[in-house]
Amino acid sequence: MSDKEQNLADSLDAFLTAKMRGASEPAPADLPEAEARLAAMLLEVAQATEPDPEFRAALDAQLYRAARQATASRPEPMSFREKMTSLQGWRFLDMKRFVGIFAAAAAIVAVALFGYFIWSNLPGNQEGPIIAGPVETPTGETPPGTIETPVTGEPPALAALPPLQGPQAAGGFGGAGGGGGDGAPPVTEAGTDITIFEPVDVFSGTEFTLGTTLPTEPASALVQQEPVPPIVDAATAREIANRFGFTGPLYTNPPYEPPPGEPAPEIIPTYMAFNGREVVQMDSFLIYYSNPAITPDQAASLPFEQAAPIAENFLRERGLLTFAYEMRPGFSPGEVLFYRLIDGRPVNESEIYVGVTAGGVYFLSYNARPVTEDLGIYPLRSAEAAWQQLLAGVVAQQIPWTVMPNQANQPVEEPLPIKSWARSFTPGAEAHFYTWPGVLIAVEPGGVPRIETYPLAIQADDDTLRAIGQNPGHPYHFWGTVGPDGQTLQVAGYEVLDEATFQPLFLEGTIQRSGDQVLLNTATGETYLLPDAPADLPDGLAVDVFGPTTRDAGQEYPLLEWDSINEKYIGPEPTEGPVIIEPAPYEPYIYQQVTANSVELAYYLTYVQDEEALAAGRYAPPLILFQPVWKFTATAENGDELIFYVQAVEAGFVQN
């Protein structure tokens, strides 16, 4: 075929495709009149013909087999995306910084982050413009979905798929409260102290109505899977760091030494690289990037229309957008979520989350799944059949659902009117600093370990850093001079503390100002001097104080090396009278009327876990399936927005 013929064929293909999609597209200018009439006739026949669903499914399977054979004949070298791993978890730097109050605060933040990622995929946060993006395949890389194993003969039998899974598939989760409430009387098992709350079916008395037309196609759809990822190695981590422009040393966590007599668990390696205050962290599940130098400013946050292209360009420049996607607004202004598209249809969970402010990208959580395999073209049940299953009972049919509560129904909780202070150090002053350093060892032989401490970053020579790195997981006492920014400590000396005897302090007391001194008079009768006391700490204030230890500095009172001071909360005085039994902390909302406003075919992530490997303590990431679902988006009578996901594959191809 000549270049002219190829160009004409491409133009005709684009013309017919646009016409089939309903677009107003003129015929190619150089298309001969006879071919133009033939194209118009074909369009009329196509628009007037509705093929038999079984024939369509068989044809889809035949085309799928031919495409598989064609791609298998063009093997490509291992791509970056194939060497990278499936990215689906959350990892933090392994630093034991503080205990007690700080550990509790970290737990609260972790729960909030987990709650956010669940919330970010609910219907209510997806309003606003949606920008579709193309697949970008870097030169020399294998396109997503390519399988390099030759396929010959008849197509393999379609494997049975697992039923859908979801946090609410088993029921018992309330609607208006947006959480897992029960509200039914607890059931206590005989002979035990375990209280079990019976789940409540919040759709037990719901009348479902259809406010839209059910689609009649497609009759079949592709099912994909993400193969079990390899464990990321140092070479791959180095390549990822280079993509972010981080050319400095690569670090990892020190090897874990189990207690005597216990087997060493299989630990997934985590790698980190740093560029000033920027950090990129990667393992077999996640690429996590942050830039603390850029502070999000909610007052001057960017609208989604401005934040989206910044996030998109940031990912493109690093070669991370290798699949079809669409972008949606995140939880807060300036946050952008990326959702995979399969055959133009979105997956229910976002794979990339980017935080953008006027200063640039300050946060990136990249758990994309860039390596996918096609399992086959599966015949689908009709949307009508899925609707009938929904009517048969959400909980009874194990249908996953999500809810975005109507904010007008949510109670507004007033924050407690108490103040808190965190320790800050005086620039240029001598200071003592107690902490658990986070030790990162250099991947390159002979490299100097990186010692992470908070709130002061220690500065020392290489020999000192190597010596500190020999005792990971132990508390340290550092002393030296605070840097001019008040955030660093030039180490003059240090000692390793005994973790068994070094116990942080939680003290209750009252603040007493005496001249230039600020004292804490504890409830048990001790008096301590508070160094670096906040200037606005009131005299006579009742407080709770957390600190690592006390120290004898040769003064009238020992110094309390404190970390945080919290104004003591004093609740209302108890009143006399009969004891009032408070109702359950959460009463689930029982939906009365739910109207489905839209129905479409979409994709749903299903995780298939290797239970045997998990029970044996082996590294066992789940196999991830991308399954087609009929997605029903609905509104309840109280304004809650709901999404129901009904498995779209015919029942004969679903595991019992």
Image (tube, rainbow, N blue to C red):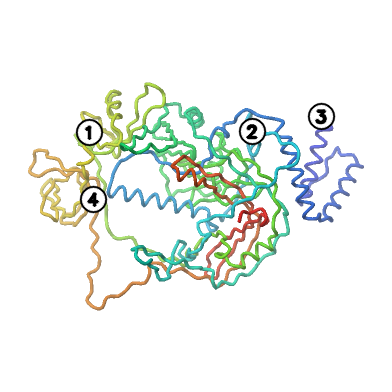
Quadrant of the frame with the N terminus: top right
Helix, strand or loop under label 3? helix
Residues at circles 1 and 2 in contact by the CB criterion of under 8 Å = no
Q: Amino acid at mark 1?
A: Val
Residue hosting label 1? 496
The 10 Å Cα crowd at callout 2, few under 14, some 14 to 19, many 20 or more, is many
Q: Amino acid at mark 3?
A: Asp
Mark toward the viewer: 4 or 1: 1
Residue hosting label 2? 142
The 10 Å Cα crowd at callout 1, few under 14, some 14 to 19, many 20 or more, is few
CA distance separating discs 4 and 1:
26 Å
* Residue 137 seen: yes
Q: Going from the N terminus, do you reach mark 1 or mark 3 first?
A: 3
CA distance separating discs 1 and 3:
75 Å
Residue hosting label 3? 3
* Residue 356 seen: no
Q: Position of residue 329 (x, y in %)?
A: 53, 51
Q: Going from the N terminus, do you reach mark 4 or mark 1 first?
A: 1
Q: Going from the N terminus, do you reach mark 2 or mark 3 first?
A: 3
Q: Amino acid at mark 2?
A: Thr
Residues at circles 4 and 1 in contact by the CB criterion of under 8 Å = no
Helix, strand or loop under label 1? strand
Which residue appears at 66% of the width and 44% of the height?
A: 375
Please state if 40 lies on the left or on the right of 608 as rendered: right
Q: Position of residue 89 (x, y in %)?
A: 47, 44
Helix, strand or loop under label 4? strand
Residues at circles 2 and 3 in contact by the CB criterion of under 8 Å = no
Q: Going from the N terminus, do you reach mark 3 or mark 4 first?
A: 3
Please state if 557 lies on the left or on the right of 115 as rendered: left
